[in-house]
Amino acid sequence: MIRILRNFVKRMFNNIFSVKRHIKLGLYGPPNAGKTTLANRICKDWLGEELGKVSSIPHETREIQVKEKVEIHHKGKTITFKLVDTPGIATKIDYENFLKHGLSKREAKKRAKEATKGVIEAIKWLDDMDVIVVVLDATKNPYTQVNLTIIGNIAARKIPLLIVANKIDLRRADVKRVEAAFPEYDVVGISAKNGTNMEEFYESLFTIVKKARRRRKRKTTK
């Protein structure tokens, strides 16, 4: 009886004094999959502005980028979230790879160092995420060590997850290959660059956010 009373008081205290926070939605994935392009598309669709710079050179995004209070609407419903764009996850970052893109040796080493730091920060931020969208390049083999590591880390934390098969505007894109690689997760094919199939993406996002809210509610009532 005393335990029940304590739990009741705890819940009442939390409801009265807790500060409502927005869902934290993280964009994760390997380099050049289109995470920042998707972040820019979301921000342009709902805020009229972009979040970050994109480039064909790997690891253009080397620091966490955040956009507060992104509010989207779909079929009469609204969700507000903090959008977190993370650096591309890689198991190995070699400065020599950047030399192929015309960077000087000094610039290449600097970018490699910053990219490595960015990967560490991105992994640290995982524990603070409510929802994660993993962005994969639909023209490439999805069954890689990097992708398995990313999704495995998310699954271990039981964070609601949506997989985006990006770049469906390209001829070699194969969404079914992504679905076959990760059959236990929802996969939506889009072109973040052209805005193709974004309605389906937003609908899937509402579904995954709903799961996240249920998960967070269970955690706060324990």
Image (tube, helix red, strand yellow):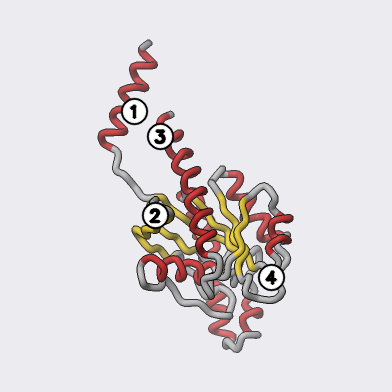
Q: Percent x, y for residue 64?
A: 45, 64
Residue type at numbered disc 2: Phe
For residue 173, which numbered disc appears in the image? 4
The answer to which quarter of the image holds residue 169 is bottom right
Say which residue appears at 69% left-offset and 70% top-offset: 173
For marks 2 and 1, the one nearer the N-term is 1
Helix, strand or loop status at disc 4: loop
Residue type at numbered disc 3: Thr
Task: Give the crowd class for mark 1: few <14, some 14-19, many >=20 residues within 10 Å.
Answer: some
**Residue for badge 3:** 220
Task: Give the crowd class for mark 3: few <14, some 14-19, many >=20 residues within 10 Å.
Answer: few
Q: Is residue 10 above or below residue 28?
A: above
Viewer-proximal residue among 204 and 101: 204
Viewer-proximal residue among 188 and 30: 188
Q: Is residue 142 above or below residue 205?
A: below
Mark toward the viewer: 2 or 1: 2
**Residue for badge 2:** 81
Q: Percent x, y for residue 200?
A: 54, 59
Q: Mark 2–mark 3 contact, CB under 8 Å? A: no
Task: Give the crowd class for mark 4: few <14, some 14-19, many >=20 residues within 10 Å.
Answer: some
Alpha carbon distance from label 2 to label 1? 24 Å
